[in-house]
Every structure is written in C-alpha cells, then in structure tokens.
Image (cartoon, rainbow, N blue to C red):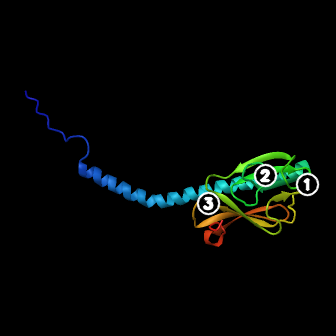
Amino acid sequence: MSCNKPLSAPAGHTLIELLITLSIAAVMAGMALPAGKSWIDASRRSSVTNQMNGLLSFARETAVHQGFDVVICPTMDGHICSEQWHSQFLLFVDRDGDRLFDTDEHLRISQLPAGWRVNWRAFGFRRYIRFQPSGYTFNQNGTLELCPPGEAEEINILILNRIGRLRLDQRDYSDSRCESG
C-alpha cells in the first residue's frame, strides 16, 4: 500500500498578484485623498469657529451675570491689549470702565491653533469687542474672519450684531482680507 498524495499548490500569492493588489490600493487611496483633505480642513475650520464662538458667548454671558462690561481684545503678551487682531485674545471684566486691562479681573486668554488668525472688521472702534451688562455690544456691528494658515476655498465668519448675537456664515477666501492680513 503506497501513500501517493497529490501535491497541493503552495500557499501564498505570487509577486504579480501582490503588485496588482498594491496598484489597485494606490489608485483608490489617490482618489480618496482629496476628499479626506477637504474633510479634515472643514473639521479644523469648525473647531476654530467653535472656539471663537465659545469665547464671545462666554464674554456676553459673563457681562450679563456679573453686571459689568466684559472686553475681548487682541494681545501679544497676555497682559496688554494690542492694536492688531491676530491669534491670541485677552478676556477681562472691565470693572473701572476704561477698556484697558489694568486692575481688572482677568478671565481668560485664548490662543488659536498655530497659523490661524482673526480679522475683525467693524464699525466704530476696532481694538476690542465690549459686551455691556445688557448683553449688547457698544454699537459694534462687525465680522470676525477666521483665517486658516494658508489659502483655502472658503473661510468661516462670525457676524456680531449690536444686540450681541452671533451668526455663522461662510465667505470665499478671495473675498476676505485673510491674504492681506
């Protein structure tokens, strides 16, 4: 009695099969990459927008609850309000009403992610946003453009009206002041 077993095919894949599989995977990844990048960009825009929306909402709520003006201003060092809006913001309760951070109650310093910055376009005085105890701004209508670290198709904007309400919108990058900064 002899045991003649048929030889089975070797397990595994040939080099040609692996190369074809890798080629198909590379083509599929190449097609998915642009869609993934736009999704990541939209997610980052949303995150920065929510951060600024939260900062402005917190300032308004604090003014109403504490009964004093609350000021948001750009800062370079976290101690003095600066002239230019960029990416770091000082929030304080302005108990003495001078709109300067001196002996006032410090509430928060907010920093945008690296490369992001804000353009504040408003009627009237532009060095700060001030919320009154009523929740209203001091005759400040304006738009915060949230500028990404590089060119984009569109940007998010927060529109602030005189009664302190915020509205989210979008604007084409080419129609913004982000590039000129």
Query: What residue occupies the far top of the structure in this picture?
Result: 1
The CA span between labels 1 and 2 is: 16 Å
Q: Which residue is mark 2?
A: 80
The CA span between labels 1 and 3 is: 34 Å
Q: Secondary structure at mark 2?
A: loop
Labels 1, 2: front one: 2
Nearer the observer, 134 or 16: 134
Nearer the observer, 106 or 79: 79
Q: Which residue is mark 1?
A: 97
x then y, percent, for residue 77: 73, 49
x then y, percent, for residue 90: 77, 51
The CA span between labels 3 and 2 is: 25 Å
Compared to residue 12, the image places residue 134 above or below, namely: below
Q: Report whether 66 appears left or right of 180.
A: right
Give the residue drawn at x 81%, y 67%. 141
Compared to residue 93, the image places residue 126 above or below, namely: below
Q: Secondary structure at mark 3?
A: loop
If the image is split into quadrants, where does the N terminus sit?
top left
Going by the numbered disc 3, the residue's amino acid type is Pro
Q: Are marks 3 and 2 in contact (CB under 8 Å)?
A: no
The mark nearer the N terminus, 3 or 2, is: 2
Crowd class of label 1 (few under 14; some 14 to 19; many from 20; radius 10 Å): few
The mark nearer the N terminus, 1 or 2, is: 2
The mark nearer the N terminus, 1 or 3, is: 1
Give the residue drawn at x 24%, y 52%. 16
x then y, percent, for residue 157: 69, 64
Q: Which residue is mark 3?
A: 148
Q: Are marks 1 and 3 in contact (CB under 8 Å)?
A: no
Q: Are marks 1 and 2 in contact (CB under 8 Å)?
A: no
Q: Report whether 175 appears left or right of 124.
A: left
Q: Quadrant of residue 181?
A: bottom right
Q: Quadrant of residue 124?
A: bottom right
